[in-house]
Image: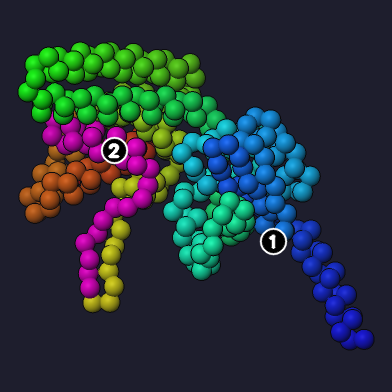
Amino acid sequence: MVEGTVGSHHKEGSRKMRKHTMICAGIDTGKRKLDVAVEASSEHHQVQNTPDGHAALSRWLRQRGVERIGIEASGGYEQTVVARLRQDGFVVIVFQPAQVRAYAKFRLQRAKNDKIDAALIAACTAATKTIRAAPDPRLAPFAAHLTLIEQLTEDIAHLETRQETCRDERIRRIWKNEMARLGALLKAELASLVAAIRQHPDLSDRLDLIASVPGVGLRTAVAILVRMPEIGQLSREQAAALAGLAPYDDDSGDRIGARHIDGGRERLRGSLYRAALAASFRWNPALIALYRRLTDAGKPHKVALVACARKMLVFVNTVVQRGTPWITCPAV
């Protein structure tokens, strides 16, 4: 009798808990299909990774009361379904693969297939406490355009290396002509991207604020605007961490390891590092002074440049927070 009473109360309490608990789902992304699992449930579903499949998935999730969805970044194959689900009002968390792998290790989970991965992502989603606001949907096409520009730059750098190491004059001319063609295309694509951004007055104003910092050229300003939409809403520590420029301790017991940077947004970090390389030697007096101070103190060239890139991002973050262009360099 007592057990029955306790069981009844337990069932009633469970129903109340379920009523007030957010239902989460996880999506394992493939090029052609999406595997979906609802957290703490045996329900799984699979749809095609197509617009029709995304519409069907949205209906299926809505029918089950799902509010929050986790999905692993998968080389861009996740982008269209993420956009559709956010448009339909779902909270969507895009996890980095390293986050999902770390969660699997924490749970001592070694088995792996699409169905299992979807359930793992669902559990990871439910365990996530802090959720950032979804990025401005206007920036997604700009990010793809910027990636094209960055890839063109990489292609030109590869061709320059080929030309420098080639001794055949005919082949060298081929590489030179190809570099000229890609260089013209790169210039046109950057102009096109900036023009597209200028169509949005708020983004245009933010771009000008970013570019007002000495040493931040137009292309670097575009990279910050597109790759870090949170700029101006972060602390300096948060901004550095998101860009992968924050130095982390590596100490254990009596061992004191060298501090190092890790993680963050790789393409953004590369843009900031390249900009700091020029700014700390020529364009920004505060960064020039910082670089000299660090190298005079015995810091390696690369460590000093990372510090300059970090300081440059702090300057940009401050300018956007204040909403006024850079006037004079703050003291370093």
Determine crowd level at label 1: few under 14, some 14-19, many 20+ residues with C-alpha closer than 10 A.
few
Q: Which residues are magenta?
A: 255-282
Tag of residue 147 = none
Residue under numbered circle 2: 270
Q: Disc 1 marks which amino acid?
A: Ala
Q: Which residue is mark 1?
A: 40
Q: Label 2 amino acid?
A: Gly
Residue lying at the far right of the rendered structure: 1
Position of 94 with respect to 219 (left or right) is: right
Location of the N terminus by quadrant is bottom right
**114 in relation to 160, above or below:** below
> Which x, y percent locates residue 103?
50, 61
Among the 4 quarters of the image, the one containing residue 146: top left
Q: 10 Å neighbourhood of mark 2: few (<14), some, or many (≥20)?
A: some
Label 2: element kind: helix
* Residue at 81% from the left image edge and 64% from the top image edge: 16
For the C terminus, which image quadrant?
A: top left
Residue toward you, 319 or 124 = 124
Q: Is residue 283 part of the magenta span, yes or no? A: no
Tell me where residue 73 appears, x and y as whole percent: 49, 43
Q: Quadrant of residue 266?
A: top left
Asked whether the viewer can see residue 70, the reply is: no
Judged by depth in the image, the label closer to the viewer, 1 or 2, is: 1
Quadrant assignment, res 219: top left
Above or below residue 14? Residue 95 is above
Q: Secondary structure at mark 1?
A: loop
Q: Could you tell whether 141 is left or right of 153 in the image?
A: right
At a point 79% along the width and 44% down the height, the residue shown is 63
Residue 275 is one of the magenta-drawn residues: yes
What is the number of callouts on the image?
2
Residue at position x 20%, y 13% from top?
Answer: 177
Q: What residue is shown at x 28% (from left), y 65% (from top)? A: 250
